[in-house]
Amino acid sequence: MTPTGNHGRAFLILHGWQNHRPANHWQHWLADRLTDLGHEVAYPQLPEPDDPDLERWLAELDALLGELEGRRVTVICHSLACLLWLHAVARDDVLSTGPVDRVLLIAPPAPEVALRHPEIAEFAPPPLTPAQLSEAATYTRVVGSDDDPYCPQGATTTYAEPLALPADLLPGQAHLNPDSGYGDWPSLLDWCLEPTPTSYEKTPIRSRTQDSRTRDSRAYDSRTRDSRTQDSRTQDSRTQDSRTQDSRTHGSRTHNSR
């Protein structure tokens, strides 16, 4: 079903290695929130996540994009799914439906990390150019931390800079998964809902820690405004009471003088 009111937007959320779409993962949370807001969302369980086969995952990706053809698709990849996307970009037989609208590559593992694990060694990223990425998506962005154990040099150095991609660096957030506290992710949802390139290119994706500070700051500002409003009303009331009392006193004095 294609929900109404979303201007043909759709979201494809792709998980990583050993991921069985747990309910406490931010991807699950994001899929639920976007669906609740009326957007079309595909959040598939990719085949054999504990021992994935690159060719099967590529075929699944191509089929999923085929089902979303004609929509403005945002692809949100986490971990191994980022490498899946890079392979799809490098191939001539995948992405047959043409370029998507937006791609997020969140916490991509480093090539040497993939090569150390026989189960995912074939996912080690192929050579790519910025031009190839531009042909596959109107806009691609990298999101990573500075202490991801699966990307020791950092996603900015490993991927964003060589591929000329914009990046959000989130200090101290590890692999951006439930183990690092990512069960929800409000600023990512906000970014997904940005309607135009101008708005989503300028909208940062913050860490949950930064999200919490922003919410606390907004709550503080709201409480401060409420307090100031109450103080102002109290002062106005006192001023009015004082004027009323002065008027009564003056009236009483005038009456007595008569």
Image (spheres, rainbow, N blue to C red):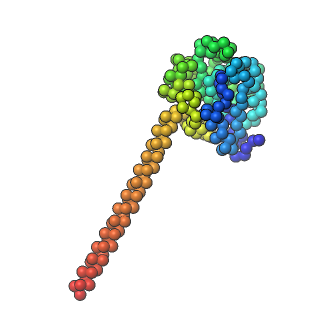
Q: Describe residue 223's horizontal placement relative to residue 64 as left or right.
A: left
Find residue 71 and report its horizontal and vertical position in percent.
73, 36
Observer-nearest of 256 and 51:
51
Q: Most extreme residue toward the bottom, as rendered?
A: 258
Please determine whether, in this image, residue 20 is positioned above or below residue 186. above
Name the quarter where the C terminus is drawn: bottom left
Question: In the image, what residue occupies the spot 49% across and 35% down?
Answer: 210
Q: Is residue 216 visible?
A: yes
Q: How many marks?
A: 0
Name the quarter where the N terminus is drawn: top right
Q: Describe residue 139's horizontal placement relative to residue 257 as left or right.
A: right
Q: Quadrant of residue 121?
A: top right
Q: Quadrant of residue 180?
A: top right
Observer-nearest of 183 and 233:
183
Observer-nearest of 164 and 37:
37
Please determine whether, in this image, residue 117 is positioned above or below residue 193. above
Question: In the image, what residue occupies the spot 35% across and 68% down?
Answer: 240
Q: Is residue 132 visible?
A: no
Q: Describe residue 48's horizontal placement relative to residue 148 as left or right.
A: right
Find residue 107 and report its horizontal and vertical position in percent.
58, 25
Find residue 236 and report its horizontal and vertical position in percent.
36, 64
Question: In the image, what residue occupies the spot 71% across and 19% down?
Answer: 52
Q: Most extreme residue toward the left, as rendered?
A: 257
Please determine whether, in this image, residue 221 is positioned above or below residue 41. below
Find residue 69 and report its horizontal and vertical position in percent.
76, 33
Question: In the image, what residue occupies the spot 25% across and 82% down?
Answer: 254
Please determine whether, in this image, residue 221 is positioned above or below residue 62. below
